[in-house]
Image (cartoon, rainbow, N blue to C red):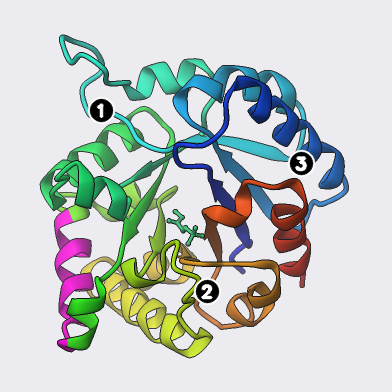
Amino acid sequence: MRKILIAGNWKMHKTSQEAVELINGLKRELADIQTVDILVCPPFTNLSEAADIIIDSNIALGAQNCHWEKEGAFTGEVSVPMLKSVRCTYVIAGHSERRKYFAESDEVVNKKIKAIKDAGLKPIFCLGETLEEREENKTFSVIETQLTGGLKDLKQDDLKDLIIAYEPVWAIGTGKTATPQQAEEVHSFIRKLLKEKFSSIVSDGLRILYGGSVKPDNTKDLINKEDIDGALVGGASLKVDSFSQIVKNSLG
Ligand code: 13P
């Protein structure tokens, strides 16, 4: 049985004071929830203070990105050991905004996933097709290429803590959610690939999140699908009410 994970990707939002307000509100609202894993991924600047607030709570902390080297002359970058030192336990890799605006290739995403795993943290590996690719019936081939590239050289044991997030680019920040059927179709395809490339232990155990305009009112229908194990939430994770409601609506 895969435990549902609801993750908030705050992207480039929240000053220090705003972040403290949001995290305190979530801690208050979600204190009783045990059957769903809850994760917040604030910007780098808010990680340390968020960690102090959620210590000993049911909310985990993640980062939105990382560099693959442990340290070095990489101005402006942040390494996985640095993220670990501020008590992050998850790191997102390969978000479509990183791929689009910062030219991240599957090869770079692969290096990041390896670095996250090697440090003992949990990678959230994002993939998804653009609208153009979907309209050209390339969804499955794009997903296969991204999955194969991102997981290159990894073995079954390396995927123990890995999470995949299917985020169709056309559904991100657009208010256009994939229908539960559209999402399920890709999720089950990803699971089939994982079985072929690794094993049924991997494909049965690995959590696959959906991301793209998840809101309180579409959460339940998405989560009810067999291969959808949670959500990676952007816009609706920025307010206490909407994120808390998404978590509550995902309860079985
Ligand atoms: P939205 O929920 O704002 O569409 O963003 C989804 C996303 O990109 C999460 O990583």
Is residue 139 shown in magenta? yes
Label 2 sits on residue: 228
Label 1 sits on residue: 67
In front of the other: 54 or 104: 104
State the image coordinates of residue 73 (x, y, percent, origin top left): 15, 9
Q: Secondary structure at mark 1?
A: loop
Whether 140 is drawn above or below 92: the answer is: below
Sequence-first tag of 3 and 1: 3
Label 3 sits on residue: 26
State the image coordinates of residue 188 (x, y, percent, origin top left): 39, 82
Q: Secondary structure at mark 2?
A: loop
Residue for point 27% across, 21% down = 77
Real-space Cα separation, disc 3 to disc 2, in angstroms: 23 Å
Residue for point 40% across, 51% down = 162
Quarter of the image where one finds residue 93: top left
Sequence-first tag of 2 and 1: 1
Magenta segment: 136-149
Q: Nearer the viewer's eye, disc 3 or disc 2?
A: 3
Whether 17 is drawn above or below 89: the answer is: above
Q: Secondary structure at mark 3?
A: helix
Quarter of the image where one finds residue 114: top left
In front of the other: 203 or 122: 122
Sequence-first tag of 3 and 2: 3
